[in-house]
Image (cartoon, grey):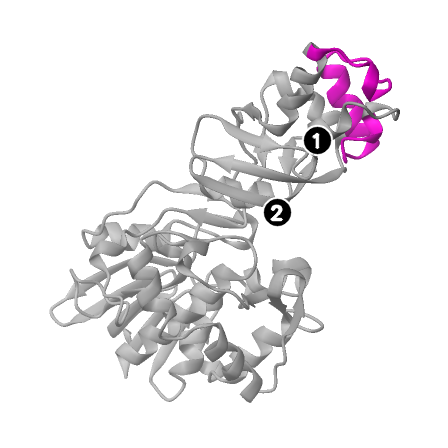
Amino acid sequence: MIKKADIVIVGAGASGLMLGALLKSRNIVILDNNSKIGSKILVSGGGKCNITNGNVKPKNFLGQQRFVRNVIKQFDQYALLSWLQERGLEPVIRKNYQYFCKNSAKELVSLLSQEIDFNNIQIDVTVESVEKKGRLFNVYTNRGTIEAKCVVVASGGLSFPKLGATTIGYDIAKSFGHKVSTLLPGLVGFTVQPEQFFFKSLSGISTDVKISVGEKEISGSLLFTHKGVSGPAVLDASLYWERGEITIDFIPTVNISSLKSSKKNISNLLGLPMRVAKSFLEELKITDRRAGELEVEEWRKIEQLKSYSFAPAGTFGYSKAEVTKGGVVVDEIDASCMMSRRVDGLYFLGEVLDVTGELGGYNFQWAFSSAYVCAKGLE
């Protein structure tokens, strides 16, 4: 027996749940292959979910800037915060204007789920394919077929495979003739080449840096790990890197010229954690001693720390990635309603699209903004 619904939403993550909450009076069905809803919300931000950021601009996203702007402006961070506060959730501000759940990400999942009729959510359901027959869609699942007037793909990306990430969103898009740009792990650490293997001995130590990737410059913390480098600055840099070199200023606040006459040892003057400073000096073959005793050639080597260039070997992969870069190409998506320009009644939201935000709440804002725009389009 074929079930019927006005709207089938594929995915019970941030964008899918937000859309369901906004369409609670409609005949909807939300499908998810996980055993619980909002799985990625629950583990994000150390379990507190970085909901949004006080400063959201198109430049914080990798993607077509005009498209991003047209979506975000319809439901920006202020509108989102107001919507949450009206329903009893008061996010708290942490570093860099980032808004988090006060106690736990469960607060956000609970709020969204309370806005949705429980009977409209089906978990442990695998969507196998979607087909359009005449004016209606058939959504084929491992538990049967659902006939719907509209289908909304809010299935997320490939990051966190242990939480049930699959390619279904991209598969649906391709089956209807949509282009999907190259998919890569995003907001993820870098593995290193043999020349940088000494980084691994510094695992667990962090330091402030400035990273240049092409024309993009990112300031923040870098964390040395047993695989290479991670930390907020590296994660953001990974959005803009595909191959080739990156350049890191390991001593962004240091004026090298001002150090040359100092009587202190150079390791104490670089503004780096001591183990990091000594490790770099060893790699540069500089004996740690009073700065005033260093030779001209040694100072030239130290200047390399202002522009240390290397090509990452790769990334830590989808299992460690916060998000997926790439996705459904937005040229064929209507920013006023999130509907496909190729297929009436087919919509795409959130991470499945070729829009990726930097670290700091931007990706959840994108999920909620795109869901709001879609809900308006489905009214």
Residue at 54% of width from left, 30% of height from top?
247
Residue 320 appears in the rendering: no
- Nearer to the camera, 229 or 219: 219
The C terminus - image quarter = bottom left
Answer above or below: position of 263 versus 92.
above
Q: Earlier in the sequence, mark 1 or mark 2?
A: 1
Residue 356 spot, x, y in % from top left: 43, 53
Q: Residues within 10 Å of mark 2 (few under 14, many from 20)?
A: many
Mark 1–mark 2 CB contact (< 8 Å): no
Asked if the magenta segment contains residue 285, the reply would be: yes
Which residue type does callout 2 highlight? Pro
**Which residue is identified by label 2?**
232
Residue at 27% of width from left, 77% of height from top?
377
The N terminus - image quarter = bottom left
**Which residue is identified by label 1?**
226
Indicate left or right for 68 with 173 as reference. Answer: right
Residue 11 spot, x, y in % from top left: 42, 64
Which residue type does callout 1 highlight? His
Q: CA distance from mark 1 to mark 2?
A: 17 Å
Residue at 22% of width from left, 55% of height from top?
331
Magenta segment: 267-296
Residue 234 spot, x, y in % from top left: 58, 40
Answer above or below: position of 92 versus 286.
below
Quarter of the rendering containing residue 95: bottom right
Q: Nearer the viewer, mark 1 or mark 2?
A: 2
